[in-house]
Amino acid sequence: MQEILQIPVLNDNYIYMLHDCLSLETAVIDPALEQPVLDILAEKGWQLNFVLNTHHHWDHVGANLALKEQTGCKIIAAASDRERIPGIDVGVEQGDVILLGQHQAQVIETPGHTSGHVVYFFAEDQALFCGDTLFVMGCGRLFEGTPQQMYTSLQALKALPPSTRVYCTHEYTMANAEFALSIEPDNLKLQEKMLAVKELRAANKSTVPTTIADEIATNPFFRVDNISIQKELGLVGAAPDVVFAALRRRKDDY
Ligand code: ZN
Ligand code: FE
């Protein structure tokens, strides 16, 4: 069994803590702040073994050095971004496998938001930690990568098992849902999801995780082959990465 804790921090970030009940190993994903992580370690009596970073932005690596100093944990992140990850010990790349006890995580490179973005996919646990690549009904902004890169990255995630739970780093769901509905107002699944999301947010609850199946049904960035989206963008029959680029630009200006 692997326990997954979600810690809301800052305005809209989530830190995730993973704990393997057999080996007692613990990992934290994208720690923006150290104190909430240290509090949980103390409360649960856990020891921190690993920090896993998805990319170099401060709200994902902010607590790296403090956690390393206070717990002696090892820091794992994209090898290609070694010089921008504070305290990095292990550089990983596409196809590498990380172990938390017996739980295996595959590393998938997903450039686009930043050039050195990676995600961690626990196949047996059906859990994906995807940083700022895929969001509920949205995707990350293109700060360093090209639309083609991000399109390819998202296609790799779309191909994961539909039941995979998707743990992204930000609660951007409400704004993403509004944009998605502006693009695809007649999508019934999307309308339903909007209602569910509104209820959760009104109760101050998290909308994360989502699933790959839900995203295939509702996320416009997963649906660029859909004719009504192509019509909305005036790009019927265009190559999917071209539709994706136009959609991402539309969201940037939304
Ligand atoms: Zn970021
Ligand atoms: Fe972020």
Image: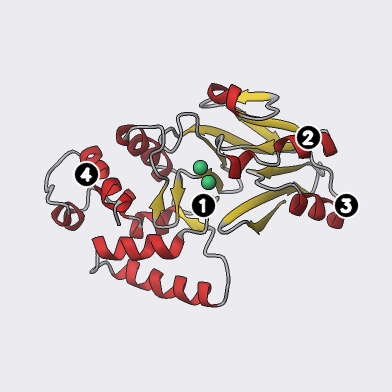
Residue 177 placement (x, y as % from top left)? 37, 64
Give residue 68's mark: 2
Res 160 → quadrant: top left
- Give how far apart the Cα atoms at labels 3 and 1 are: 27 Å
Res 40 → quadrant: bottom right
Residue 134 placement (x, y as % from top left)? 44, 47
Query: Is the C-beta separation of discs 2 and 3 under 8 Å?
Result: no
Mark 2 / mark 1, whichever is N-terminal? 2
Label 4, secondary structure: give it.
Answer: helix
Left or right: where does residue 44 sit relative to residue 108?
right
- Give how far apart the Cα atoms at labels 2 and 3 are: 17 Å
Residue 90 placement (x, y as % from top left)? 67, 24
Label 2, secondary structure: give it.
Answer: helix
Question: Can you identify the residue that label 3 sits on?
Answer: 45
Foreground residue, 121 or 130? Answer: 130
Foreground residue, 53 or 27? Answer: 53
Give residue 243's mark: 4
Residue 197 placement (x, y as % from top left)? 46, 70
Question: Label 2 is placed on what type of residue?
Answer: Lys
Question: Label 3 is placed on what type of residue?
Answer: Gly
Question: Label 1 is placed on what type of residue?
Answer: Val
Number of the front mark, 4 or 2? 2
- Give how far apart the Cα atoms at labels 4 and 2 are: 43 Å
Question: Can you identify the residue that label 1 sits on?
Answer: 166
Label 3, secondary structure: give it.
Answer: loop
Is 250 situated above or below 182? above
